[in-house]
Each structure stands twice: as structure tokens, then as C-alpha cells.
């Protein structure tokens, strides 16, 4: 996989970038767009795993097989994940002519956990400029101190907590994952000023089936890490809790440094690790971004989106891993608009220079440079920002 190149300079800088104070967003005007849902499965044509991997490259071919996709994607859930954090008409939310901003939330839900006791440990802002020919992934650290607004749906009174708690606060008391995503989106909007065109909740446990449908993905660990979640028993990978019950000898799962093809279970386990990594959660963020890009690249390069048999299996697997929100915009418009975006144009960006950043209270916070980066997102000048700040580009392949 070729290294990511710095995007071209779009225009000269126009002064220094500053971000709004925490908890405040820029003034907005205009009515909010309607978020009523279509009764037919048109949204399903968004293709495979839109929210996570941006697999729109083969838009023309996919549109030509709408019937197959509609039948295969009936089990993918779509809900209102944005609430008041969706773009207004004044912000360009009524169409896809301008930049597109998506919120991707990764949850690591497991069957034994209660639905309202899950936090979003992977928080990614996906930005597509108005040129619609490339895309950026920006991860927000899970431990970032955030002012979480009150949420009447669940009776949450608001407070200052780690940002990943916003999902849990919105999901409790019957809010469900839909409420969790809405409160997270509102929290991020208050922190960065960014409104969203759509969103996706990604159950990382469900990613295994998607990767298995692809066969494998090419991952390039930059450092060796021993899994804290899984071990081998008789040569087979198992969750540690299950492995202990066997009473047999357990061998730790070790993810070696260097590029390699990973099966679904291995890729997912690697993307979950943070203990033992040099920069802890920051390295995990980059590993998760790398996984998303690897999935997109594998699907677009090996014909999974143009082979109807492969596409059918891939979409069925994705149906167990995603909840989507397209913001009420017809999905065929998404497919057409983003047909020029490929896995090669998924540019992965680092927050806080890829390492812990403390605020005056000793808690983790977004650095001034990161807040400037989100200001560039709002102004659709991210390519310019990256050109002058190339150090924010992740060195992951």
C-alpha cells in the first residue's frame, strides 16, 4: 500500500485558525432539515458499510444492481442518530453539494453486557471536502474531558466527564443506542462546532464477519503487542474468559510488528489493544483508522463491490455490524456523490500530535492545534490545514 501523500494546497492561508470555547458552537441560522424516513429500503443502497469504510468507489456498478442490494440489506438498521446535531439547511444539510461530515461511533458491545451500559470508545469524525474526491478520518480521544449537555430523553442532567461517557448517558433509561449517539453528537458539536450530515454506530464485534467476508485485511503493526483479551488454546484463539474455563494451557496472542494479512478475529483483536502500546489509546485510534482503511481498500481493489455474489455476502455481514443515519438525504445521492472517493483517499489524521495532552485540571483535552483542525473542518479548509501541518498525518500505511 503506498504511503499517504499530503493533499494539494487549495488556497493560501487567511489568518490564524482559532476554535470556539468548549461547550459553545458558532451561531446558526435557518430551519433544520426534516429527518423523516423513507418507507422503502432506499437507504440500504448506501452500499456495504458506508459508515465505516466509505466503500463508494464503484458507485456506478452498485447503482446498476439496486434490486440485489435492496434485498440483501433489509436487516441493516437505520435510525435518527444525530438529533439536534444534524446540519441545518443554512449549514448545507439540505443537499450533498458541499462538504460532508459523518460521525462514526465504535462500540465494543458483547452479549453479556446490558444495552444501556456501553460506552463509545472509538469516536471518529469523517470529513469529505466539497470536491468529493478524498476523505479524512479524525479520531477524538475517548478520555477527553467534555462538557456533556443535559439530555431530557433519559433524564441526564449534564456534567463534565470523559467524552466516551456521553454515549452511555444518552443510552441509559431507555434512550438506547440511538439516544447514546444523539448525545455524543451534541457533545462533539458543542466542543468542536462541527455539525453532521449523517452517522453510523459500528459494533466492532460485528466487524469480524465483515472482514471474514472479505477474506482478510492487510494490517501493518508498528510495534509488537500482546493481547490482553485473547489467548490460544490448542492452537485456536479464544476470549480469555472462555479460555480459562477450559482448564487447558493458554498461549498469549501476540500481534507481531510488520505488514501481514489478518483474519477477522486477529484484526479486531489488534484494533482493540491499547495497553502495551507506546501511546496507549492514541496508538489504538490509529490502529482502528488503519483497519477501516484496510477494509475499504480490500473491498475496492478485489472486486467485492462489483461481484454480486461477494457483494451480497458482504452486505449481509455488514447488517449485523452497523446502525446508519443518512440524515434524510436519498441514499442513491450519497452513492453518486462519493463515487470518486476510494480507499487510497482515506487520509488518517492525528489529534493532539498522537499523544496525551493535559488541560489545566490535569485531564485530557484537545490541543489548540486539534481545535484549529476542527475549525478547518467547519470551514472546509482541511486540505489547506494539513498542507501546513503535515505532522498531523498518521504515518500508518
Image (spheres, grey):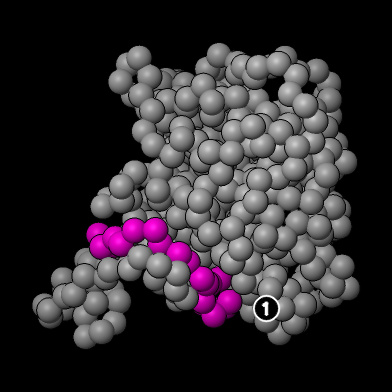
- Side of 59 relative to 164 (left or right): right
Residue 131's x, y, as percent? 83, 44
Quarter of the figure with residue 345: bottom right
Residue 377 visible (yes or no): no
- In this picture, which residue range is highlighted in magenta? 209-229
Mark 1 sits on what residue?
Answer: 302
Residue 154's x, y, as percent? 49, 31
Residue at screen point 66% across, 46% down: 6
Q: Residues within 10 Å of mark 1 (few under 14, many from 20)?
A: few
With respect to residue 122, does 237 lie above or below?
A: below
With respect to residue 211, does 144 lie above or below?
A: above
Between 149 and 129, the residue placed more toward the observer is: 129
Which SS class for mark 1?
Answer: loop
Residue 12 visible (yes or no): yes
- Side of 280 relative to 66 (left or right): left
Magenta run includes residue 375: no
Quarter of the figure with residue 194: top right
Amino acid at each position: 500500500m503506498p504511503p499517504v501523500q499530503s493533499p494539494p494546497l487549495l488556497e493560501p492561508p487567511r489568518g490564524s485558525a482559532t476554535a470556539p470555547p468548549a461547550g459553545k458552537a458558532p451561531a446558526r441560522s435557518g430551519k433544520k432539515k426534516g429527518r423523516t424516513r423513507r418507507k422503502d429500503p432506499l437507504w440500504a443502497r448506501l452500499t456495504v458499510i458506508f459508515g465505516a469504510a466509505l466503500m463508494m468507489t464503484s458507485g456506478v456498478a452498485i447503482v446498476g444492481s439496486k434490486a440485489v442490494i435492496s434485498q440483501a440489506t433489509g436487516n441493516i438498521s437505520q435510525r435518527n442518530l444525530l438529533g439536534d446535531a444534524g446540519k441545518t439547511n443554512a449549514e448545507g444539510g439540505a443537499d450533498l453539494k458541499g462538504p460532508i461530515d459523518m460521525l462514526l461511533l465504535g462500540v465494543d458491545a458483547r452479549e453479556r453486557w446490558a444495552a444501556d451500559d456501553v460506552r463509545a470508545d472509538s469516536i471518529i469524525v469523517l470529513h469529505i471536502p466539497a470536491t468529493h474526491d478524498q476523505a479524512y478520518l479524525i479520531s477524538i480521544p475517548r478520555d477527553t474531558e467534555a462538557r456533556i449537555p443535559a439530555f431530557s430523553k433519559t433524564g441526564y442532567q449534564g456534567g463534565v466527564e470523559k467524552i466516551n461517557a456521553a454515549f452511555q448517558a444518552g443510552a441509559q433509561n431507555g434512550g438506547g443506542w440511538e439516544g447514546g449517539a444523539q448525545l455524543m453528537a451534541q457533545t462533539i458539536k458543542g466542543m468542536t462546532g462541527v455539525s453532521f450530515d449523517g452517522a453510523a454506530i459500528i459494533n466492532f464485534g460485528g466487524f469480524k464477519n465483515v472482514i471474514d467476508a472479505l477474506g482478510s485485511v492487510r494490517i501493518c503493526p508498528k510495534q509488537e503487542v500482546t493481547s490482553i483479551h485473547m489467548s490460544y488454546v490448542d492452537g485456536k484463539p479464544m476470549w480469555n474468559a472462555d479460555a480459562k474455563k477450559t482448564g487447558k494451557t493458554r498461549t498469549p496472542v501476540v500481534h507481531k510488528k510488520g505488514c501481514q494479512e489478518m483474519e477477522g478475529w486477529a484484526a479486531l483483536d489488534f484494533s482493540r489493544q491499547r495497553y502495551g502500546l507506546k501511546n496507549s489509546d492514541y496508538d489504538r485510534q490509529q490502529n482502528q483508522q488503519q483497519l477501516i482503511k484496510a477494509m475499504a481498500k480490500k473491498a475496492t481493489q478485489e472486486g467485492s463491490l462489483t461481484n454480486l455474489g461477494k457483494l451480497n455476502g458482504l452486505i449481509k455481514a455488514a447488517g449485523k455490524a452497523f446502525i446508519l443515519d443518512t440524515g434524510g438525504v436519498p441514499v442513491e445521492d450519497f452513492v453518486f456523490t462519493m463515487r470518486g472517493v476510494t480507499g487510497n483517499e482515506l487520509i488518517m489524521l492525528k489529534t493532539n500530535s498522537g499523544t496525551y495532552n493535559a488541560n489545566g485540571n490535569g485531564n485530557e483535552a484537545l490541543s489548540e492545534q486539534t481545535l484549529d483542525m476542527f475549525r478547518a473542518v467547519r470551514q472546509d479548509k482541511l486540505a489547506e490545514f494539513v498542507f501546513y501541518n503535515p505532522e498531523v498525518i498518521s504515518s500508518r500505511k
